[in-house]
Image (cartoon, rainbow, N blue to C red):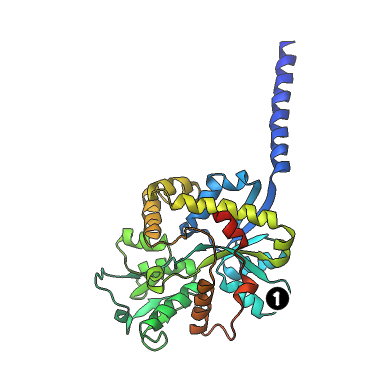
C-alpha cells in the first residue's frame, strides 16, 4: 500500500508538472525573432529576455541568430522568422528591389554605431587624419560598419580609397585575431573584440565610430507588413517588452546590467562584460524609447548614398511606423 501511495503521488506530481507545462504553452504566443548577431551591443534585448518581460507580455520568444543582415532578412521574407532585428538599410534595399510585401521597421534599438577604432599604440590626441597612408582592417562592403566608417572618413575630408588601404577581405569575426597576429596598423572592432585586444595589450581603442558618426539608427526591429496587419497585438506586446528592457538599461548601473545579461554571454567574464556595457552606456548607445524618427531614417539614407549603395531614396512613411513604440513609451 505504501509503495502504491508513493507511486500515485509521483504520478500526480508528474501530471502537475506536465499540465503546468501545457498551460504555459497554451497561454503564451510563440514568436520567432531572428537577430543579425548575438552581441553585448544589444543589451536591452537580453535584459528583456532574462528579466522575463516577453513572458509577462504573453510571448514565448524563440531567439535565432542569423549571422548577417542578408540571412536575417531572408528569414523574415520567407516567414521562417516573425520579426527581424538588423540594420534598417536591409528594409530599404528590399523595398528598392521591388518587394511586394515590404518589411516595415517598428522599433529602433541602438542610436549609435557599436564599433571602435583600435590602434597598435595609445593615441591620446588621435585625429582621423592620422589614418592617412596606413593599413586598416575594415568591414564588408555595403555593410553598416564599413559604411559608417567611410562616412566618418569623408566627413573628415578623407578619401577611403586613396588616402589609406582598407582591407575588407577578412571575415567580421576574425579581424581582431588578424590584428593581434600582426596584420594592419588599425582595425575597426565591435565588442568584445576591442576590449579583448586592450586586455591582451595588442591594441588600444583610440576612437568611437558611434560618437564620431553621430546618432545613427544602427539597428531596428522589423516585420513584413502583412504580419503586422495580421498580428498588431503581438507587435505591440513585443515592443512593450523591449521598452521595459530599454527602461532597465537607462536606470541601472553597468554592473547590474552585466549581471542580468551574463547568461547570454557565458564565455565572457563578468568584469569584461561590465567594462563593455559601461563603454556602450557612456556613449549613449541606447535610446530612451524605441521611436524611429524621420531625421534618423534620412541620415541613414545619407550614409547609404555617401557609400554609393543607394540609387534612389525611399519614403520614411513606407518603411517605418512609430505607432507601437509611441504606445509602449506612454
Q: Is residue 217 above or below residue 23?
A: below
Residue 229 visible at all: yes
Instruction: Give the total of numbered labels.
Output: 1
Give the image quarter of residue 63.
bottom right
Residue at x-position 57% and y-position 44%: 52
Q: Could you say where residue 254 lies in the image, as x and y percent from the top left?
A: 39, 50
Q: Is residue 100 above or below residue 268?
A: below
Q: Could you say where residue 195 lies in the image, as x and y percent from the top left?
A: 36, 60
Q: Is residue 130 above or below residue 269?
A: below
Figure quadrant of the C terminus: bottom right
Please name whichever residue, 155 or 270, is drawn nearer the observer in this view of the structure: 155
Residue at x-position 41% and y-position 68%: 210
Q: Could you say where residue 166 lies in the image, as x and y percent from the top left?
A: 41, 80
Name the residue furthest bottom: 162
* Left or right of 284, for residue 60: right
Give the image quarter of residue 213.
bottom left
Q: Could you say where residue 288 lies in the image, as x and y percent from the top left?
A: 47, 58
Figure quadrant of the N terminus: top right
Neighbours of disc 1 within 10 Å: few (<14), some (14-19), many (20+): few
Name the residue furthest front: 330
**What SS does tag 1 mark?**
loop
Residue to which mark 1 is pinned? 99
* Left or right of 319, for residue 300: left
Please name whichever residue, 166 or 33, is drawn nearer the observer in this view of the structure: 33
Residue 267 visible at all: no
Amino acid at each position: 500500500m505504501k509503495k502504491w501511495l508513493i507511486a500515485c503521488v509521483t504520478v500526480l506530481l508528474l501530471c502537475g508538472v506536465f499540465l503546468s507545462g501545457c498551460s504555459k504553452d497554451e497561454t503564451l504566443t510563440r514568436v520567432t525573432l531572428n537577430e543579425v548577431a548575438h552581441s553585448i551591443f544589444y543589451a536591452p534585448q537580453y535584459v528583456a529576455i532574462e528579466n522575463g518581460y516577453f513572458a509577462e507580455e504573453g510571448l514565448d520568444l524563440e531567439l535565432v541568430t542569423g549571422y548577417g543582415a542578408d540571412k536575417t532578412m531572408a528569414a523574415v521574407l520567407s516567414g521562417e522568422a516573425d520579426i527581424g532585428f538588423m540594420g534598417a538599410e536591409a528594409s530599404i534595399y528590399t523595398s528598392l528591389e521591388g518587394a511586394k510585401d515590404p518589411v516595415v521597421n517598428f522599433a529602433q534599438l541602438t542610436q549609435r554605431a557599436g564599433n571602435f577604432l583600435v590602434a597598435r599604440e595609445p593615441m591620446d590626441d588621435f585625429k582621423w587624419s592620422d589614418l592617412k597612408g596606413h593599413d586598416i582592417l575594415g568591414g564588408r562592403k555595403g555593410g553598416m560598419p564599413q559604411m559608417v566608417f567611410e562616412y566618418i572618413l569623408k566627413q573628415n575630408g578623407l578619401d577611403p580609397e586613396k588616402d589609406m588601404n582598407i582591407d575588407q577581405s577578412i571575415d567580421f569575426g576574425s579581424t581582431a585575431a588578424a590584428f593581434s597576429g600582426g596584420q594592419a596598423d588599425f582595425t575597426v572592432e565591435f565588442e568584445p573584440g576591442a576590449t579583448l585586444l586592450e586586455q591582451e595589450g595588442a591594441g588600444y581603442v583610440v576612437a568611437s565610430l558611434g560618437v564620431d558618426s553621430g546618432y545613427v539608427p544602427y539597428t531596428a526591429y522589423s516585420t513584413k507588413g502583412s504580419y503586422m496587419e495580421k498580428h498588431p497585438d503581438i507587435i505591440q506586446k513585443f515592443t512593450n517588452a523591449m521598452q521595459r528592457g530599454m527602461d532597465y538599461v537607462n536606470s541601472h548601473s553597468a554592473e547590474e546590467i552585466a549581471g542580468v545579461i551574463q547568461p547570454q554571454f557565458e564565455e565572457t567574464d563578468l568584469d569584461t562584460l561590465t567594462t563593455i556595457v559601461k563603454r556602450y552606456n557612456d556613449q549613449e548607445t541606447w535610446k530612451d524609447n524605441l521611436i524611429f524618427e524621420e531625421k534618423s531614417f534620412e541620415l541613414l539614407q545619407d550614409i547609404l548614398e555617401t557609400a554609393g549603395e543607394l540609387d534612389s531614396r525611399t519614403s520614411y512613411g513606407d518603411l517605418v511606423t512609430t505607432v507601437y513604440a509611441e504606445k509602449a513609451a506612454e
